[in-house]
Image (cartoon, grey):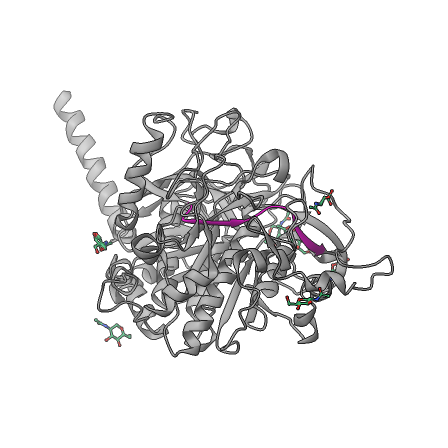
Amino acid sequence: MLDINRISFWAVLIAAFALTAQASPSFMYDVLKERVGVPQGWVRRSISNESEIIPLRIALKQANPGTIESTLNQTSDPDSKNYLKHLSKTDVLQLLKPSNRSAKVVRDWLESHDAHLSRRSSAHSLLVEVPVHKARRMLNADFSVFEHRDTSEKVVRTTEYHLPRDVADHVDFIGGTTYFSTLHTMRRPARTVEKDVQMPNTDQHGRISKVNLNQSGAVQNGVPSSCNASKVTNQCLRDFYGTADYKPKAASKTHIGIAGFLNETANYQDLDLFLQSQRPDALRGHASFDYISVNGATNNQSLEASTGEAALDVQTAVGITWPIRTSFYSVGGSPPFKKDEFTPTDTNEPYLQLLEHLLQLEDHQLPDVLSVSYGDDEQTVPEKYARRVCTLFAALGLRGVTVFDSSGDQGVGGDSKSECVTNDGNNKPTFLASFPSTCPYVTSVGATQDFAPERVTTKKFSDIVSGGGFSRYFNRPSYQDDVVTSYLTDYQGTQYHDLYNPLGRAYPDVAAQGSRFLISVGGKFELISGTSASTPLFASIVSLLNDARIAQNKATLGFINPLLYKRLGGSGAFNDITHGSAEGCGDYKGFKAAQGWDPVTGFGTPKFKTLLNKVLDL
Ligand SMILES: *[C@@H]1O[C@H](CO)[C@@H](O)[C@H](O)[C@H]1NC(C)=O
Ligand SMILES: *[C@@H]1O[C@H](CO)[C@@H](O)[C@H](O)[C@H]1NC(C)=O
Ligand SMILES: *[C@@H]1O[C@H](CO)[C@@H](O)[C@H](O)[C@H]1NC(C)=O
Ligand SMILES: *[C@@H]1O[C@H](CO)[C@@H](O)[C@H](O)[C@H]1NC(C)=O
Ligand SMILES: *[C@@H]1O[C@H](CO)[C@@H](O)[C@H](O)[C@H]1NC(C)=O
Ligand SMILES: *[C@@H]1O[C@H](CO)[C@@H](O)[C@H](O)[C@H]1NC(C)=O
Ligand SMILES: *[C@@H]1O[C@H](CO)[C@@H](O)[C@H](O)[C@H]1NC(C)=O
């Protein structure tokens, strides 16, 4: 009996094997490609319509992974003979290219499921739009609708997906699966901060008063007379950091880019209002910006559609850099869905769309500085997705672009202790790092307030606390080994050692004012705080540095962190911030600002003139 049973068992197994093998000879074994926890705030619901179409973006593996990073290591190291020898579009795309075999294997697999490539596929990532039931089969994945408890936003996602073994080796990750975008802006038009503020420098008829336009120059105790910490104007920022008397020399060749996600809309009329009161010479010079739509975003210039983040970013940048060319990249969502209760609204994976767009631009179309005032809690971004996006930021660096990102507005994490827990089901207390600031190829910017001395923003005065911390995905890059080790030894010790990863990429790298900027939104002035403010500010100052270099036929600064850590930090080119700390996650003090580099203000805030002398010598 035993024997017979055994024989029939094997016979059945072999028969089954043969059948499967015949049906699909090369796609047999499932490999678990990724598994994530459902991020806080999202609730699983059932899908009412299995025929609903969802996009899957298959990011193909690079033929030679790591070449982007190792090449960038040379072009960004001031001691390398290849320093600032930026690569062309063709060369960078070549480095990113998948092997022919990868492309073929993945195409064959898609074909075997009768999934057709969308025209929006590229050489690096293939897009298919398939019904949910097909996506389930292709990826052996448990797609559901997830609804956000607070915003009622709905997305179709899965918490894990699989690929046939032969295919898995050729794919970095698949977009549209495990990433629950919690992308948010890094600003607060907040409680203590007023709305509808009277324009500065105007009389009751709205006319600009002459007296106040001549504020540059006078400085008392290191504070220009144009500055008042409770209402920060662009003129003040230009006086304080020393850019006010710098006239751009290569404005038509220099180019600053501003990223816009989540329907953020920059308005031309708002920019005019802002310039009228804070930078009238630019207004007379017809300052404006290019509105560039990526992935179907619409440019709605009705004043009611104007939003705070875009207004803050564009106005700050144009105010500092005029007449340098400014582009606002408005990144739209993926295919529109019908709005009914269980229909997803948006399955947007915004960084990828922006990065693929930028990397396809010709060299003369590419901005040399990109300011990103958005971020996600790192742990809610699937690791494979984060790594791919980070490599694409590195690819921009290889082409000579400096990418800035806000370090976050909640110190070491969320508002309360209960938010600061791991996402892996264990709910272990942890500080929350912010992506893409944790990507070592991005320059992360923290925020300060006050002028004498400048200090870390506080909740009480600015409604935000400069973010800072350590990645759990990305190892500490070698460029910051020395300063981070010193900080941990000299100041941090073992405090909070179980709440962060001391071996991870530490951020921010630098800081700038980020408190109570006076900005026009929808025709009215508001005071807006955030690392969202400090980021376009710092990016603008680097844009002026680029301008000076371009005027001397020198290359743009590109990925700037190795230069920062090797040469500029600790050289007198920054105001070292030593007051305040990255309070967050309830009542944790977080990381303290300290002499030299620290994980709340980096090396500090820029001294433009000193930086200018140093970068012209490179
Ligand atoms: C389900 O979605 C498909 C594709 O969008 C659509 O054609 C169909 O009408 C929908 N069915 C129902 C019952 O809504
Ligand atoms: C970059 O170069 C430094 C030394 O210049 C080295 O320590 C580091 O490992 C390199 N990193 C990569 C990714 O090649
Ligand atoms: C890859 O495919 C391209 C275009 O089909 C071809 O030109 C190239 O020679 C192929 N490369 C290799 C290594 O086979
Ligand atoms: C404006 O500034 C200039 C240079 O600092 C100075 O000479 C002039 O007197 C000032 N004018 C007024 C009205 O304050
Ligand atoms: C700064 O502005 C605040 C609020 O508008 C005002 O109360 C204060 O007097 C100003 N300080 C100076 C020195 O002008
Ligand atoms: C963006 O705007 C469109 C059209 O007004 C709307 O359907 C969509 O829900 C908005 N998306 C977000 C994330 O606000
Ligand atoms: C532009 O935005 C306004 C205000 O949100 C809205 O009423 C209007 O319909 C929008 N226009 C278009 C063309 O989407």
Viewer-closest of 433 and 525: 525
The location of residue 399, given as percent across then percent down, is: 36, 68
Q: Residue at x 63, y 43 (%)?
A: 188
Q: Position of residue 420 (x, y in %)?
A: 48, 29
Dominant SS of magenta comes to strand
The reply, left or right, for residue 224 in relation to residue 521 is left
Q: Nearer the viewer, residue 299 or 458?
A: 458
Rendered-image quadrant of the C terminus: bottom left
Q: Quadrant of residue 261?
A: bottom right
510 within the magenta span: yes
In this rendering, the count of numbered labels is 0
Q: For the view shown, which residue lies furthest in the left direction?
A: 3
Residue 33: horizontal and vertical position, in percent?
33, 44
Query: On the rendered image, what quadrant is the N terminus found in?
Result: top left
Residue 117 is at least partly visible in this image: no
Residue 2 colored in magenta in the image: no
The residue located at (45%, 31%) in the rendering is 590
User: Image check: 275 left or right of 443?
Assistant: right
505 up-or-down from 68: above or below: above
- For the magenta stretch, what is the residue range? 508-520
Q: Quadrant of residue 311?
A: bottom right
Depth order, front residue of 390/164: 390
Residue name at image x 52 percent, y 76 percent: 251
Q: Is residue 58 visible?
A: yes
Residue 481 sits above or below residue 553 on the image = above
Q: Position of residue 433 (x, y in %)?
A: 43, 39
Q: Is residue 64 above or below residue 462?
A: below
Q: Nearer the viewer, residue 560 or 179?
A: 560
- Find the residue positioned furthest to the top: 1
